[in-house]
Amino acid sequence: MTPKAPIAAIAPALSFPADFVWGVATSSFQIEGAAALDGKGPSIWDHFCRVPGAIADGSNGDLACDHVHRWAGDLDIVQRLGVDAYRFSVSWPRVQPTGSGAWNTAGLDFYERLVDGLLERGVAPYLTLNHWDLPQALQDQGGWANRDTVHRFVDYARGMAARLGDRVASITTHNEPWVVAVLGHETGIFAPGIQDRGQAMQAAHHLLLSHGLALQALRADGCASALGIVLNLSPVQPASPTPADIDQARLEDGRLVRWYMDPLFHGRYPQDIVDFLGADAPQVASGDMAIIAQTMDFLGVNYYTRAVVSAQGPWDAHQSGLELTDMGWEVYPEGLTELLLRLHRDYAVPPLFVTENGGAFKDRLEDGRIHDAGRTAYIASHIAAVGEALRQGVPMAGYMVWSLLDNFEWASGYEKRFGIVHVDYPTQQRTLKDSAQWYREFLLQQRALRAARSALPARV
Ligand code: FCB
């Protein structure tokens, strides 16, 4: 199935509010490079990339998109796209090399320049504190499975907010705690590469606890930025209507969605999953759950595809007949509307942002152009899905494309390209793909609509 998209197809969903935030997103380890420059300490991803076989193409983040040196040109591109916001993350070991104690001035200065550079270009900075690159020195003491890391994170959060909180629109504590916990500590396909369900669930608990404590601390410090967390969520559907598949889907929904949403919004873990985990359930100290359930200013949702589960084992996405991206993920925009409606129905959610959405496709550079119609269609159809959620009453506040640039896609290395801007790694040349041109035109159209609407006489 080839989705049709461009602007005409999303016209019915164009009634985005005037203050809706349009953006693009990146993360530190995936683009920065400069892995050991100016006092930066090693992160768990620097280490993990050295494990033979861990990264599909044997690559690492040493150079990546060389963004530490090319940030000004990259921000010019961001400005040219006409977005309202740029979501980026801070590399904790760049600013605090061992994760505690001494701060690294050169690292802090880099983020100062980045934030000021965004403001000079009229783009709001959306900062994420933890997009997975934990200082290796903290991993050496047990990492996220060690409760002490919670307190190290709160100190780091306070330090960054003291430095940048007067200029960043928003601070996200963690990006996708499920990934850190499950892919990092249970399946071990991501850093730190541990395979232990008990440690995974303990890490998940500590991530949530550190989120809650950081929010309390930043608010007590008078931080004016909007505060929240970003979760990777999908609707989970049974492969068939058999009771076994339905049970499996409920379990998976519990582990992916409710394990994070229930504590954040209801102050408790889902009992069916606690029972399922048995001895692998995390140690929870008295008072932890109330700390986790801090009121948030926003919730970020990263959406790529739905999850289909079967009691028979892994489900083969080729069965559905839907288009697949280069990650092998189904293109399923309806799932985004379904997910957003469900979050709004089951939880008292604050304003919601889609903080990541996009697709990896096999791009071909032809005469200096990349005609990535598949990516454009993907983005357009998911924007329409957000528009539909808005129409049905979900408090949507923004949408951000993943990603600004092609970059280091974790265990897939540089083989998968998510950027709307192409990066030629040997020369580091950037080229706007057709999808970037499309997004730019779409945003111009949005702006024109906003202007036209505000010129209308007020309704009486
Ligand atoms: C998300 C990550 C992001 C990127 C996309 C494709 O899980 O947050 O860094 O890798 O997937």
Image (cartoon, rainbow, N blue to C red):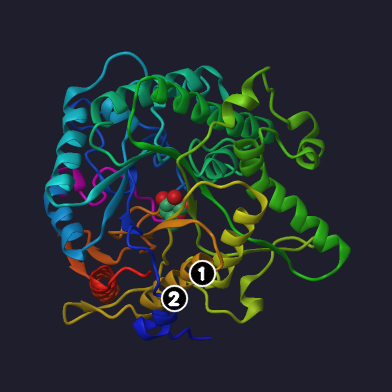
Asked which quadrant contains residue 438, the reply is bottom left
Left or right? Give the position of 426 relative to 222.
Answer: left
| Spot occupied by residue 257 in the image (x, y as percentages of width and height) | 64, 49
Left or right? Give the position of 38 relative to 175.
Answer: left
Q: Is mark 1 within 8 Å of ligand 1?
A: no
| Spot occupied by residue 95 in the image (x, y as percentages of width and height) | 27, 27
Q: Is mark 2 within 8 Å of ligand 1?
A: no
Q: Pointer 1: what residue?
A: 391
Any part of residue 326 in sight: no
Query: Which residue, as the protein is rendered here, is positioned at the far right?
Result: 243
Q: Earlier in the sequence, mark 1 or mark 2?
A: 2
Any part of residue 4 in sight: yes
Q: Secondary structure at mark 2?
A: helix
Q: Pointer 2: what residue?
A: 13
Left or right? Give the position of 327 relative to 288.
Answer: left
Residue 216 drawn in magenta? no
The magenta stretch is 57-70
Residue in the picture at 29% in, 66% down = 420
Residue in the picture at 37% in, 86% down = 8
Query: Which residue, as the protein is rendered here, is positioned at the far front?
Result: 460
- The answer to whether marks 1 and 2 mark residues whose Cβ atoms lie closer than 8 Å is yes
Q: Secondary structure at mark 1?
A: helix
Which quadrant, please, contains the N terminus?
bottom right
Instruction: Judge whether 370 appears above or below 52 on screen.
Output: below
Instruction: Judge whether 25 appears above or below 444 on screen.
Output: above
Q: For the residue marked with disc 2, what is the amino acid? A: Ala
Q: Nearer the viewer, residue 139 or 337?
A: 337
Instruction: Judge whether 259 appears above or below 413 on screen.
Output: above
